[in-house]
Amino acid sequence: MPLDITAVRRDAPATLTNAYLNAGTNGPLSRYAAEAIAGANESQLSEGRIGPGIYERSLAISTELRSAFARLLGGGDDEIALTHHTTDGMNIAVWGQKYQPGDEIVTTSLEHPGGLVPVLVAAKRFGVTVRVVPVEITDDGPTTAAKVIAAITPRTRLVAVSHVSWKSGVLLPLTEIAERVHAVGGLLAVDGAQSAGAIAIDVRALDVDYYAIPGQKWLCGPDGVGALYVRRERILDTQQTFAGGPALRDGNAWDMAGNYLPGTTARRFEVATVYKPALAGMLASLHWLEGLGYAVIYERIQALTAHCRETLAAIPGVTVYTPATQAGLTSFNIEGVEPVQASARLGEMGVLIRSVSNPDLLRASTSFYNDESDIERLQRGIEVVIGEQ
């Protein structure tokens, strides 16, 4: 059943005031998330944050949220840890390995700092060699995957890559990479910041070991909530970097002799206090998306992204870099115009996209709440920018 876009945009009201084409940075907050956050805040204000039943209600929200993320990713509830963002999850995955001298981590030159910097820090701490695969902005998914696979050696302990490049929008075929790195005894950690909520994900079919995602981008949730899938077979072998009460089997699973028992699910990677209203907001947004139907959401994103790519490619002076096999991002340049300046000028016209650097590009995100009028506004805005040269 097609989406009622009028209703969808009413439930994400920021889309009514601008051509909101930047889910890759921050999606519009859903009305349901905002209402759930406000309700949780009001409850804390009026009832307090302790008292009969309050802890149990909070625990139930966290449990339900793990289940919602598990359904999104195709994993089990026990394989999901609640995090603050993608970077949180990538740090857990990268820091959780038992590195030995001479071990290698393979990554690419187009990774987001949220996935790349944890690799660089771990390399300094443990003396691990980082093999950065040079990837061109014009490389498609199979070409990029082939380069990554060629860089894997018997010393590769971990491959850390994005499912969808935040710069080029390229969709990486992960199964081939997973097969190769597993063949040498290594693991695959995936930055899913530009894929979760934009394309269908089945972590088991992809054969990944870790998959880190945020809630505030394509899932229209609040800042400060994300999730990490940890393959069930990897949970006990992945070392805990941070630990606290939630990371234990139970509250008494430790003693003063230095002994402790971690939990047996991915929850062992969760620590300390979180902003509970944000969890309620994230859950409300995921319920909204499930109600709309992920399949129809993904289908619409694919159609709008293809339309955006074709529209931009037809504008004289515009070069599109994202290949035809894509998720929801379209990266491009305007001849003779700096991306930062173009993005700012488009913003003045109510067209919200962004620029990225190294290489310098413009990036538009087309999501399920967008329509053809948003892409037309982007087209007209670009033509204005070109005319002002």
Image (cartoon, rainbow, N blue to C red):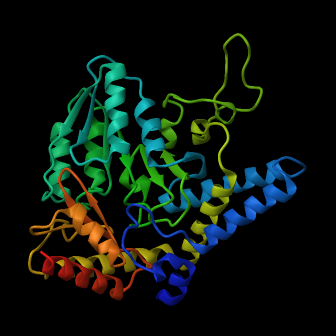
Q: In which quadrant of the rendered image does the C terminus lie?
A: bottom left
Spot occupied by residue 263 in the image (x, y as percentages of width and height): 64, 34
Q: Is residue 1 visible?
A: no
| Residue at figure coordinates x 27%, y 72% from the top left | 345
**Snapshot quadrant of residue 335:** bottom left
Q: Nearer the viewer, residue 314 or 134?
A: 314
For residue 114, above or below residue 72:
above
Left or right: where does residue 18 sit relative to residue 221? left
Left or right: where does residue 314 sit relative to residue 264? left
Q: Is residue 172 visible?
A: yes
| Residue at figure coordinates x 56%, y 53% from the top left | 225
For residue 287, above or below residue 311:
above
The image shows a total of numbered marks equal to: 0
Q: Residue furthest right?
A: 52
Q: Nearer the viewer, residue 339 or 270?
A: 339
Spot occupied by residue 177 in the image (x, y as percentages of width and height): 26, 46
Spot occupied by residue 20 in the image (x, y as percentages of width and height): 40, 75
**Snapshot quadrant of residue 337:** bottom left
For residue 49, above or below residue 150:
below
Left or right: where does residue 327 sit relative to residue 235? left
| Residue at figure coordinates x 14%, y 77% from the top left | 386
| Residue at figure coordinates x 49%, y 49% from the top left | 85
Spot occupied by residue 251 in the image (x, y as percentages of width and height): 76, 31
